[in-house]
Amino acid sequence: MNKEKIIEVQNLTKQFGNFTAVKSISFDVYKGEIFGFLGANGAGKTTAMKMLIGISKPTSGEALVAGFDVKTNTEMVKKSIGYMSQKFSMYDDLTIKENITFFGGIYGLSKARIKEKTMQLVEELRLHDSIDKLVGSLPLGWKQKLSFSVALLHEPKIVFLDEPTGGVDPITRRQFWEMIYAEANKGTTIFVTTHYMDEAEYCDRISIMVEGVIEALDSPKNLKNKYNVASMNDVFLKLARNVESP
Ligand SMILES: Nc1ncnc2c1ncn2[C@@H]1O[C@H](COP(=O)(O)OP(=O)(O)OP(=O)(O)O)[C@@H](O)[C@H]1O
């Protein structure tokens, strides 16, 4: 794997009043890496991710995303990244083609480039018969795959995926991950949160957050060795259980 750093995080902290949601976390992510960002509900993943995509100001600490400071250069951070979440997909009342045109425009693509990208997506996702269908009429799995492709329209260096496969069936999730692999192979960095432990196994490295702190960070294989368990699910349970016991 290429060891060029694409995300550099140093002592990043976020406080809401007296409550510290993210407690001085530090880590690096490498170019082309699939980086899994795991943690139980409320562990601080979304808060950390919001700081990295430049929409929430850190209370303290530093983060460089694609070489740009998330505190002072948010515009360049936003241009360098793609983002998709389970909650925000595409506009249900626009067709697939209209959604691609709309988001392409937001990302600053020329008309010619949007046309080119639309044709590319039609081929890759085999959309020949459905390009003029309303997105609202598509199954969730299709929406999520499309949404991923749309997040990549402007060819960002990093794509942030916040629980991208929530509620999607296992076969579609597998297809989604094939798309992720293909994109990572092109050199795009994937930063992904998930609650599915089978997906954690697919990542190059995993960070596990517990109560605002990064409790563990390594490859799935090394984490399983370290905690002497057979699956990422067991690693996760072990760390979560440690929190529950006084
Ligand atoms: N704007 C806010 N004001 C106050 N507290 C907040 C705010 N946003 C998040 N929190 C708190 O920070 C903690 C971390 O929340 P966060 O959403 O980052 O967790 P998460 O790991 O993403 O959880 P989930 O998996 O449920 O999305 C939670 O206790 C949450 O209530």
Image (cartoon, rainbow, N blue to C red):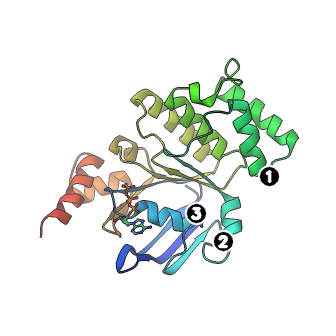
Q: Which mark is residue 146?
A: none
Question: Mark 1: which secondary structure?
Answer: loop
Q: Is residue 91 above or below residue 235?
A: above
Q: Name the mark on residue 68.
A: 2
Q: Is residue 18 above or below residue 70?
A: below
Rendered residue at 75%/50% (across/down): 106
Q: Is residue 95 left or right of residue 12?
A: right
Quadrant including the C terminus: bottom left
Q: Quadrant of ligand 1?
A: bottom left
In the picture, residue 145 is in which quadrant? top right
Q: Position of residue 220 (x, y in %)?
A: 36, 52
> In which quadrant will I find the N terminus?
bottom right
Question: 179 left or right of 241?
Answer: right
Q: Secondary structure at mark 3?
A: loop
**Circle 1 or circle 2, nearest the eye:** 1
| 149 relative to 50 in the view: left or right | right
The numbered mark at residue 53 is 3
Sequence-wise, the earlier of marks 3 and 2 is 3
Q: CA distance from mark 1 to mark 3?
A: 18 Å
Q: x and y percent of residue 186 in the render?
A: 65, 46
The residue singled out by tag 1 in the image is 108
237 or 104, nearer to the observer: 104
Mark 1 touching mark 3, by CB under 8 A? Answer: no
Which residue sits at x=68%, y=53%?
A: 156
Q: Residue furthest top?
A: 129
Earlier sequence position, callout 1 versus callout 3: 3
Rendering quarter of residue 90: top right
Say whether residue 41 is left or right of residue 75.
Answer: left
User: Label 3 is placed on what type of residue?
Assistant: Ile
